[in-house]
Amino acid sequence: MEVRRHPLLGPAFAFADTVFVDRDDHAQAVAALDDAVATLRRGLAVAIAPEGTRSHGAALGPFKKGAFRIALAAGVPIVPIVIHDAWRVLPRSAWVMTAATVHVSVLEPAPTLDWKREQLDAHVADVRERMAAALAQGHRGHA
């Protein structure tokens, strides 16, 4: 289920001016990415789920490159944020949220100013590995 179709979260995210990317519509997806770059250049933060879709359970899924292309184009760092146990609040197939405790780890930013487009796969893999390590380590009292 995509979050935009969720009866509570969909309208809440729409109200918050969330940009939903339709991966089946290339032109719409490119326009959405351009909007995100413009937003970053105005000095505002953009939150992007790098997996592109929610994974099943606590496993970290493969990362899409869109967030990394946006950061590279805007010349801004990527700040990896790991949300531990978020799947307990709203499992992928669920429509109703459950009360649960989650912890958040904010990792060191990955500067993009010296990145080259042809090295993007390596940078994506590096950030994913850092996030996977934080997940494996657990929250350990981090808030």
Image (cartoon, grey):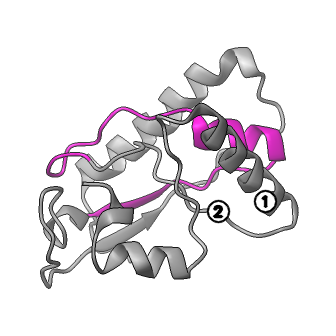
Mark 1 Cα shell of 10 Å, populated few (<14), some (14-19), many (≥20): some
- Give the residues in magenta: 55-84
**Where does residue 108 sit, x and y in percent of width and height?**
58, 54
Q: Are marks 2 and 1 in contact (CB under 8 Å)?
A: yes
Q: Is residue 39 left or right of residue 95?
A: right
What's the residue at 51%, 38% (across, down)? 127
| Residue 111 can be seen, yes or no | no
- Residue occupied by mark 2: 46
What's the residue at 46%, 52% (across, down)? 49
Image quadrant occupied by the N terminus:
bottom left
When the figure is inspected, residue 85 is found, relative to residue 49, above or below; the finding is: below
Q: Which mark is residue 40?
A: 1
Instruction: Say which amino acid is labelled 2.
Output: Val
**Where does residue 139 sit, x and y in percent of width and height?**
28, 65
Image quadrant occupied by the C terminus:
bottom left
Instruction: Say which amino acid is labelled 1.
Output: Leu
Q: Is residue 123 left or right of residue 97?
A: right
**Where does residue 124 sit, x and y in percent of width and height?**
54, 31
Q: Secondary structure at mark 1?
A: helix
Q: Quadrant of residue 6?
A: bottom left
| Residue 7 can be seen, yes or no | yes
Which residue occupies the foreground of this view, 132 or 91? Answer: 91
Is residue 61 within the magenta segment?
A: yes
Is residue 36 within the magenta segment?
A: no
